[in-house]
Amino acid sequence: MKWHYEIEYPRKPIKCVLTSSGESSTEAPSQDLVFTHGAGGTLESDAVANFVEGFASSGSAILCFQGNMNLQSRVKMFKVVIESGDHEGSITCVGGRSMGARAAIMAAPTGISHYVLVSYPLHTDKDVRDGILLELPDTAKVIFVSGDKDNMCEISQLDAVRKKMQCLTWRIVVGGADHGMTVTPKAGTKAVGLKTGEVVAEWLGGENLNDNHEGKITWNEETEQAQWTGWQGEN
């Protein structure tokens, strides 16, 4: 089920979509995660759409909103979405893809306990964007979802930053995926995208963690399915 609505905002309303796998109802469920897309993407981009579908398939609800390419503007929009209607004070998990992940951290008010950072753009050729990660409080719980071919988030650099962070972190590596969470073949892109959403929803629900903090999703050409290793290793 999808609920489409708009939130008033200067110049142009913010388009929102709440997605859940729940049965048909006139009343929208409470969101488990507020999420936004990357700088050049939309809510219809494969990387976002696949993640959202997988997340919602677990029975969880995800609220996504459409923004523009400016980081500071996206942060302001994120705050408006969080504070709108009955949401204020009830949201404990925020996240986003690429630039949207940065905006989620920067917009998060006191009370946010969980962060979902998909394809976090950790570095450029010149800079490492770890400042806001290192400032997260020790009470936070953070999950990273990154492709091992993502040229904006080398896994070794991400692990080095995770070791310096004050809070607990988890990491899902998607085998063969680039920054756009694309793998070969196209069917694999859909399947691994769905699986990332499913695993993140399970993580948010606290399922099967057992003090393990790392896992990998890969596309199996023989079975034509996305495979998840389960949680392994330490933080």
Image (spheres, helix red, strand yellow):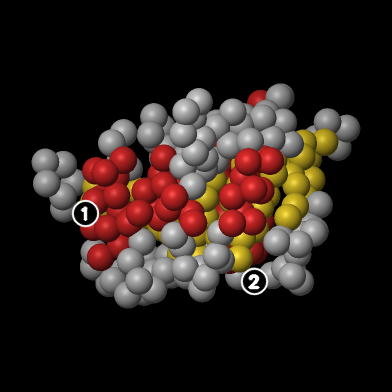
Residue 145 in the image, given as x and y percentages of width and height: 61, 47
Tag 1 or tag 2, which sits nearer the N-term? 1
- Disc 1 packing (10 Å; few <14; some 14–19; many ≥20): some
Is residue 219 at least partly visible in the picture? yes
**SS class, disc 2:** loop
Query: Farthest residue in the right direction?
Result: 222
Which picture quadrant has residue 100? Answer: top left
Q: In this rendering, would 150 be left or right of 35?
A: right
Q: In the image, which disc is placed on residue 175?
A: none
Does residue 226 sit above or below 17 in this rendering?
above
Residue 124 in the image, given as x and y percentages of width and height: 49, 30
Q: In this rendering, would 15 be left or right of 174?
A: left
Look at mark 1 in the image and give the residue it sits on.
7
Q: Residue at x 76, y 71 (%)?
A: 210
Indicate the amino acid at tag 2: Gly
**SS class, disc 1:** strand
Q: Residue at x 71, y 24 (%)?
A: 185
Q: Which-is-in-front pick, marks 2 and 1? A: 2
Tell me how far mark 2 sits from mark 1, CA to CA.
Answer: 31 Å
Indicate the amino acid at tag 1: Ile
The quadrant of the picture occupied by the C terminus is bottom right
Residue 113 in the image, given as x and y percentages of width and height: 47, 70
- Disc 2 packing (10 Å; few <14; some 14–19; many ≥20): few
Q: In this rendering, would 68 be left or right of 47?
A: left
Look at mark 2 in the image and give the residue it sits on.
206
